[in-house]
Image: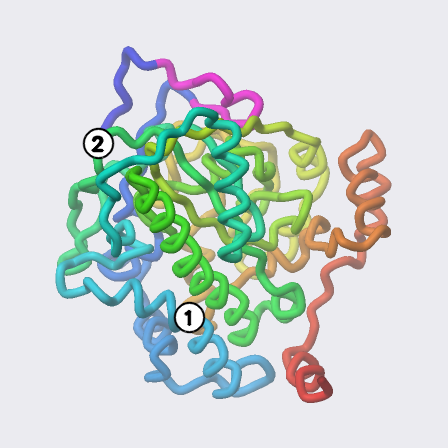
């Protein structure tokens, strides 16, 4: 699907969010994401792929060694449980909710809509509600259809299928969910995958509950995780953080240690404004994530217009990973990898004064000093130490 030639690729708010779209832009088809391709594309499928997916059902023998024992896989898979229950409930209809299809509504839209006189006040209320249900961050932006996937995926045959979204949706509520710092420190390991799975399960419950609240107010709300659209452009336009070399959103609260979910709605809300602090300038001089990547899937140079890899969006100038190399490492490990998150200098506990001072330095003209101070930051913690620590508590 080509972007309409009479539509300017750049839009209001793009520059502030650090988004650079070119005339070659094309909306992304979700069947081209590397995880979906792993089911049908021989360029991604390998002898390790089936074992990778089977390990999430405890059907594949765990690897031996610290971080890859049965206990590690057992915790990781238990962490995924709620997300799995949601994503599997309509599998027979070709909808893997939260991943290749939006989460289906469990509550009707109330017949009578609550009148919203002050969208700014309603936005503040929504952020409070999101926090009440367990979200760590919440930002609000406009529904920019450039980031909607050109089609969803029918998981029965991996073909394109329509989204069937309600008419009139115009706003995206973006929720951030913090990953456990101590578990992230053990990447790469199956144990660390519990940090990912726990937040996907949190996402599923939180995003469904927030959407149910909106529907009870009389407005449409579609809860969404990895499905329906790219989430990073919405997160940066909602002012939650800035895009980084490691393909993640760096936030001032949690660095890159977040998962994101979203809700598409027509609830009248005021939108947030992105305010870049200088993450890109820091990433321009920092290559810790690219240096640490075992398969060299992350870029070393400046942002470029992507699109050469099937799993890269076309017509956006940004740092782009080689998704095929990345996933090949995941498949061989039978678990996800986030070494790039672990070693990122922004992966810190910003509740501590020393890390807040480092952040201020990193986002200033003294960023080179901040980088030198982060030289030994992000060392791996042995998974066995995490288990030993849990036994001591």
Seen at 37% across and 28% down, the residue is 144
Q: Can residue 127 be spotted in the picture?
A: yes
7 to the left or right of 365:
left
Say left or right for 266 vs 200.
left
367 up-or-down from 132: above or below = above
Label ID, residue 387? none
- Residue sitting nearer the eye, 179 or 7: 179
| Rendered residue at 26%/37% (across/down) | 112
Residue for badge 2: 167
The quadrant of the picture occupied by the C terminus is bottom right
Q: Is residue 349 above or below residue 238?
A: below
Magenta range is: 8-21
Mark 2 or 1, nearer chain start: 1
- Residue at screen point 60% across, 60% down: 339
Q: Quadrant of residue 301?
A: top right
Give the class, few, some or many, for how many residues have Cα within 10 Å of label 2's Cα (few <14, many ≥20): few
Q: Residue at x 32, y 46 (%)?
A: 216
* Along the viewing direction, whichever of 304 and 33 lies nearer the viewer: 33
Q: Position of residue 350 (x, y in %)?
A: 75, 51
Residue 27, percent across and down?
Answer: 31, 32
* Disc 1 element: loop
User: Whole-percent x and y of residue 358?
Assistant: 82, 45
SS at mark 2? loop
Q: Which residue was labeled with disc 1? A: 80
Depth check, front residue: 80 or 1: 80
Which secondary structure class fits the magenta region best?
loop
Does the magenta portion include 9? Answer: yes
Q: How is the image coloured?
A: rainbow
Query: On the rendered structure, is 390 left or right of 233?
Result: right
């Amino acid at each position: 699907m080509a972007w309409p030639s009479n539509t300017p690729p750049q839009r209001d708010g793009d520059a502030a969010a650090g988004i650079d779209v070119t005339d070659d832009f094309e909306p992304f088809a979700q069947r081209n994401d590397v995880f979906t391709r792993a089911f049908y594309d021989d360029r991604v499928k390998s002898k390790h792929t089936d074992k990778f997916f089977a390990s999430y059902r405890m059907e594949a023998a765990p690897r031996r060694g610290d971080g890859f024992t049965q206990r590690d896989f057992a915790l990781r898979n238990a962490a995924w449980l709620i997300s799995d229950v949601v994503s599997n409930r309509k599998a027979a209809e070709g909808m893997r909710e939260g991943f290749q299809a939006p989460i289906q509504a469990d509550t009707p839209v109330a017949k009578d809509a609550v009148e919203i006189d002050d969208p700014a006040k309603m936005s503040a209320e929504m952020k409070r509600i999101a926090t009440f249900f367990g979200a760590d961050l919440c930002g609000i932006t406009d529904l920019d259809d450039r980031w909607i996937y050109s089609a969803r995926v029918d998981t029965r045959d991996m073909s394109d299928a329509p989204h069937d979204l309600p008419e009139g949706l115009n706003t995206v509520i973006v929720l951030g969910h913090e990953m456990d710092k101590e578990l992230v420190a053990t990447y790469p390991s199956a144990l660390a995958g519990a940090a990912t799975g726990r937040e996907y399960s949190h996402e599923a419950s939180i995003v469904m509950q927030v959407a149910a609240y909106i529907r009870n107010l009389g407005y449409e709300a579609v809860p969404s995780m990895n499905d329906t659209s790219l989430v990073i452009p919405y997160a940066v336009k909602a002012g939650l953080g800035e895009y980084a070399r490691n393909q993640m959103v760096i936030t001032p609260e949690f660095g890159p240690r977040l998962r994101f979910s979203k809700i598409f709605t027509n609830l009248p809300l005021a939108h947030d404004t992105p305010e870049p602090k200088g993450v890109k300038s820091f990433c321009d001089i920092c290559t810790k994530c690219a240096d640490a990547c075992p398969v060299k899937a992350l870029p070393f140079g400046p942002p470029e217009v992507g699109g050469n890899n099937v799993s890269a969006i076309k017509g956006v100038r940004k740092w782009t990973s080689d998704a095929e190399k990345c996933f090949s490492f995941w498949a061989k490990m039978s678990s996800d990898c986030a070494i790039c998150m672990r070693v990122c200098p922004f992966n810190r506990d910003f509740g501590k004064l020393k890390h807040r001072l480092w952040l201020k330095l990193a986002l200033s003209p003294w960023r080179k000093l901040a980088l030198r101070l982060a030289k030994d930051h992000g060392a791996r913690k042995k998974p066995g130490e995490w288990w030993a620590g849990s036994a001591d508590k």
